[in-house]
Amino acid sequence: MRVVLAEDLFLLRDGLVRLLQAYDFEIAAAVETGPELARALAELEPDVAVVDVRLPPTNTDEGLQCALQARRRKPGLPVLVLSQHVEQLYARELLADGSGGVGYLLKDRVFDADQFVDAVRRVAAGGTAMDPQVIQQLLTRRAADDQPLARLTPRETEVLELMAQGRTNAAIADRLVVTERAIAKHTANIFAKLGLEVSDDDNRRVLAVLAYLDHGR
């Protein structure tokens, strides 16, 4: 699996390169600026891009914007964005096209190698990998003025958060120490209350929930 990595801090960039290589990823390019990232994404067409939101020369959201431009050229290009803090605007922009293959993680997650690598693989496969803190903020922001979300039980809200992180029913059941059948019942209730069509496609259901939380109906 070929990866384009963009991170301006040398030590973190070098650490990510070594980590990904240890898990049999091929590093197609490891760059530190926005222009370098734009060229790498256009010329190398990687299987997945792991991108710091803030890159030189602007050190604002240049990394994210380069990734979004690349996805406009190649819809569905898998992109995992890394950020120092939760920025809901960045999450909204990343999710806006609804085509999958996206992730948003806080940099602290990098220190859990298995969790980080799982997120890269999930995104590369066309799924989602959203940081729990991002999901929690989206839920909290919408729940206050969104009647359907307010109808969810505490357990359904917990299941929804785990769904939005990209977890399967089996993984959620294991996490909550309940049966998979119980989770299936919770997910059916969640979709019914949110007015969303139930689907067996885990990626589509997560994207639908995220789109609902972020943009409404």
Image (cartoon, helix red, strand yellow):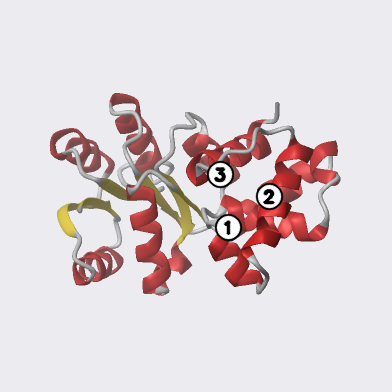
Instruction: Please state the horizontal and vertical placement of residue 6, each as a whole percent of the image.
Output: 27, 51
Q: Nearer the viewer, mark 3 or mark 2?
A: 2
Q: Dot 2: few (<14), some (14–19), or many (≥20) neighbours within 10 Å?
A: many
Assign a secondary structure to mark 1: helix
Amino acid residing under circle 2: Thr
User: In which quarter of the view is residue 116 placed?
Assistant: bottom left
What residue appears at the point 36 percent right and 44 percent down from the top-left corner?
79
Q: Dot 1: few (<14), some (14–19), or many (≥20) neighbours within 10 Å?
A: many
- Alpha-carbon distance for marks 1 and 3? 11 Å
Q: Dot 3: few (<14), some (14–19), or many (≥20) neighbours within 10 Å?
A: many
Assign a secondary structure to mark 3: helix
- Alpha-carbon distance for marks 2 and 1? 8 Å
Amino acid residing under circle 1: Asn
| Residue 187 circle label | 2
Query: Depth check: 8 or 201 in front?
Result: 201
The residue beneath circle 1 is 169
What residue appears at the point 81 percent right and 49 percent down from the top-left corner?
152
Instruction: Please state the horizontal and vertical placement of residue 174, each as a whole percent of the image.
Output: 58, 71
Q: Are marks 2 and 1 in contact (CB under 8 Å)?
A: yes
- In the image, residue 132 sits, relative to residue 45, either above or below, namely below
| Residue 16 circle label | none
Query: Depth check: 34 or 70 in front?
Result: 70
Of mark 2 and mark 1, the one earlier in the sequence is 1
| Residue 206 circle label | 3
Q: Are marks 3 and 2 in contact (CB under 8 Å)?
A: no
Whether residue 52 is visible here, answered yes or no, is no
- Alpha-carbon distance for marks 3 and 2? 11 Å
Residue 109 is left or right of residue 121, and the answer is: right
* Direction front: furthest residue: 181
